[in-house]
Image (tube, helix red, strand yellow):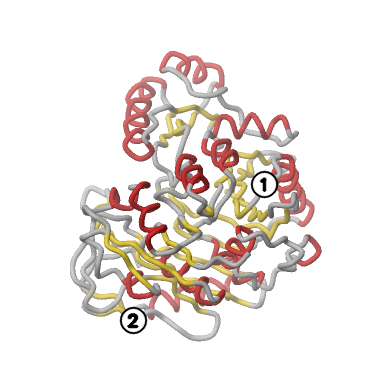
Amino acid sequence: MRFSGILIANRGEVAIRISRACADLGVSSVAVFSQDDKNSLHVKMADDAVALSGVGASSYLDIDTLLQVAQETGCDAIHPGYGFLSERVDFAEQCNAKGITFIGPESHHLRLFGDKAAARSAAQCAGIPVSRGTVGAVSLEQAEEFFDAVNGSVIIKALAGGGGRGTRLVSRKEDLKDAFRACQSEAEKAFGISEVYLEKFVERARHIEVQIIGDHFGNVAHLGDRECSVQRRNQKLVEIAPAPNLPDQLRNEILESALKFARSQKYSSLGTFEYLLDLDSEDDNFVFIEANARLQVEHTVTEEVTGVDLVVSQIEVASGRSLSDLNLTEDKYSPRGFSLQARVNLEHMLSNGSIAPSSGVIETYEPPSGPGIRTDGFGYAGYTTNTNFDSLIAKIIVHSNTYKLDELAKKAVRALSEFRFEDVKNNI
C-alpha cells in the first residue's frame, strides 16, 4: 500500500524531516501550524499547510481538529513526529477508528511503554535486567520506605512521558517530600498524569540506547546503539553512535537484550530501548530503564553510521512493507565510523546559574557545511523565535569514517564554531 498523503502532526525541524522523507517517497505532505507559528519553516517545506486555531503547543494537541484536517486534505496517514501526540494511545486509536494509519507503534505498545513501571515489569518477565525500583506508582509514604530500603540516593521519575521532565535526584531524606511534590506537579503539567515511581540512583553511569525497528509480520531488527551520557538536568545534549569504547561482548549483550525484549512484545515501527551501564560494577552490569515508542530526536546519528533513512523506513513499515523488503535484517547492520549530534537550543544562562528561554529576531542564520556535516533545523534569517515552543532550533550532526573520537570531536567543534547564529541567545 502506498499512502496518498501524510499529515504531519508536529512542527519545526522534525516536521521538515518528515516532509523530506515524504518527498523522497513521492507522497504528498500536509503541514499544520498554530496562529503564532505561521512563519515557521516547516510550513513552507510541506506540499500543503493548514492553519490551526489558537496559539502555542496546545494547538498541536487538538486530536479532533487534526483528524478533520487529515480527512479534508485526503491524507490516509498521520506522522506524529516526536513529543506532542507521538506517544498518545488515544490519538493512535482514534486515527485507526477513522481509517487513518498512525505512523508509529501499535496502540498496545504505546500503552505498555507509556507506563514505565509496566515496561519494567514486562522487561523482567522477558528476562531483561532492570534497575532496583518500586513496583508501579507510589505514595509519598511508600517513597520514604523505598528510600530507607536502598540506603542511598534515589531518582524520582514521572510514570509517563520523557525528556527529563518530572525527574528529581534525592540524596537526603529530608529533601524527599519537596522533590516528590515537585515531580508530581511537573508530570501533571507535562503529561497530564501526576503519578511517579522511584529507582535506585546509579552514581556513575553511561546511558546506552538501542535503535529497534519492527514490521507488522513479527520481524524485529536492531540498527545498533547510541550513547546519550552527555546530559544536562536529565536532558540529552550530545549523542554519539555507536557508543565509543564499549567492549564488543558487552555491546552485543546490550543489543541482544533489546532485541529479545522487542521480540517478546512483537514490537512494530521504530523504538528505542534504553539502558544504564553501571561504571562502578565489576562485571559491567547494565539494566533496562525505559523504551521510547517513537522516532527519537537523536535518530540522525544512527542514520549517518548505517546509511538507513529511519523516517522513510518507518513510513514504509507503516504502509505494510516488511523488513526484508527494506533490506533491514540483522546481518545487514555494520556501522560506518562515528557520528555525533549536538543540540542547539534557544536559551541563555542567568547569573544564578539557571537557564531561561531566549527569543527575538534571528538576524543571521548560516548553518555549517562541508564533508560529513549535516544540519537539521528550521531557523532562517529574519525568523522571529517563539518561547511558546520547545527551545530546540537545530541539530548539528557530524560524521567521521574513522573510529577516532578526537577526529569526531574536532569536526563537531569546527561545525559549531562555523554556525553563524546572531542576535538570539543560544547554547552554541
To which quarter of the image does residue 25 belong? bottom right
Residue at screen point 21% across, 61% down: 36
How far apart marks 2 and 1 lie (CA) works out to: 40 Å
Q: Position of residue 388 (x, y in %)?
A: 24, 54
Q: In percent of the image, x 50 and y 71: which residue is there?
A: 397
Is residue 284 shown left or right of residue 418? Answer: right
- Residue 105 versus residue 241 in the image, above or below: above
Please tell me how crowded label 1 is: few (under 14), some (14-19), or many (20+) other residues with Cα within 10 Å: many
**Residue type at numbered disc 2:** Glu
Q: Is residue 134 left or right of residue 413?
A: right
- The x, y position of residue 247, in whole percent, is 74, 55
Kind of residue indicated by mark 1:
Tyr
Q: Is residue 279 visible?
A: no
Q: Which mark is residue 366?
A: 2
Q: Which mark is residue 267?
A: 1
Q: Say few, some or many: other residues with alpha carbon within 10 Å of mark 2 (under 14 / 14 to 19 / 20 or more).
A: few
Compared across the picture, whether 165 is left or right of 274 comes to: left
Q: Confirm or deny contact between disc 2 and disc 1 (CB under 8 A).
A: no
Name above or below for residue 401 compared with residue 71: below
Q: Secondary structure at mark 2?
A: strand
Q: In front: 84, or 337?
A: 84
Q: Residue 198, percent across and down?
A: 50, 27
Image quarter hosting the N terminus: bottom right
Q: Which mark is residue 348?
A: none
Q: Locate the C terminus and report the quarter of the image it occupies.
A: bottom left
Report the front residue among 21 and 229. Answer: 21
Q: Please indicate, yes or no, whether residue 377 appears anywhere in the rendered image.
A: yes
The secondary structure type at the circle numbered 1 is loop
Q: Where is 253 relative to 342, above or below?
A: above
Q: Position of residue 255 (x, y in %)?
A: 72, 51
Mark earlier in primary sequence (2, 1): 1
Which numbered disc, 2 or 1, marks the residue closer to the eye? 1
